[in-house]
Amino acid sequence: MIFTETKLKGAYILDVKRIEDERGFFGRSFCQKEFEEYGLTNDIRQTNVSYNKKKGTLRGMHMQLAPNEETKLVRCTRGAIYDVIIDMRPDSETYKQWIGVELTADNYRMLFVPEGFAHGFITLEDNTDVTYQVTEFYTPGAERGLRWNDPAFNIEWPIEPIIISEKDQAHPDFVEGQEESKGKLLV
């Protein structure tokens, strides 16, 4: 696997190191030893699949609070997405900064999302599937969200969303100072 750290400390783009021949290629999409070499959490507890019928479907921005924070390993297995994460760790040098990465079924690219980050994506094709491996179980009382178009973050989405859930549209604007004393977001 090829690990490329992003400008957001602890967040990585992962590419499959391909061994190719006339049949196609072989490569790893996960290796506990390699994750440990980079100091990345790899205690996968749940795998989720998101099916999205239409191009322009936006999901996010989602996260869970302590003690139910989760890391995610995100991969698009059919279609294409623009995957976005925001560093919501108040003590981080890149607090409130975001990155976006195009993940497609064809590029086999993945995004490692550390604890303390909000995550969301927009589909770039119809009939897009996204798989998340997560290190924590879904905990309804710990979930929080940030609005996809909150001016506090100025995310530059590549296309205009067409479908957004009522829940994701209703997330409030981020207000500075909404953190717990332990540095966890209380949106």
Image (cartoon, grey):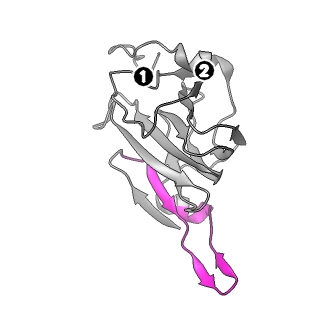
In the rendered image, residue 106, in percent from the top left (x then y), is placed at 59, 62
- Looking at the rendering, the stretch of residues picked out in magenta corresponds to 9-34
Q: Which of 69 and 52 is in front in this view?
A: 52
The residue that appears at 61% across and 61% down in the rendered structure is 32
* Residue 29 belongs to the span the image colors magenta: yes
Judge left or right: residue 165 versus residue 7.
Answer: right
Identify the secondary structure beneath mark 1. Answer: loop
Judge left or right: residue 45 versus residue 176.
Answer: right
Identify the secondary structure beneath mark 2. Answer: helix
Q: How many discs appear?
A: 2
- The circle on residue 70 is none
Q: Which of 147 and 118 is in front in this view?
A: 147
Judge left or right: residue 87 versus residue 123.
Answer: left
Q: Marks 1 and 2, how far apart in space?
A: 15 Å
Q: What residue type is labelled 2?
A: Ala
Instruction: Identify residue for label 1.
Output: 182
In the rendered image, residue 25, in percent from the top left (x then y), is placed at 64, 77
Above/below status of 5 relative to 27? above
Above/below status of 93 relative to 16? above
The residue that appears at 33% across and 21% down in the rendered structure is 151
Q: Which amino acid does label 1 sit on?
A: Lys
- Decide which of tag 1 and tag 2 comes sooner along the chain: 2
* Residue 31 belongs to the span the image colors magenta: yes
Q: Nearer the viewer, residue 156 or 108?
A: 156
* Among the 4 quarters of the image, the one containing residue 149: top left
- The circle on residue 142 is 2
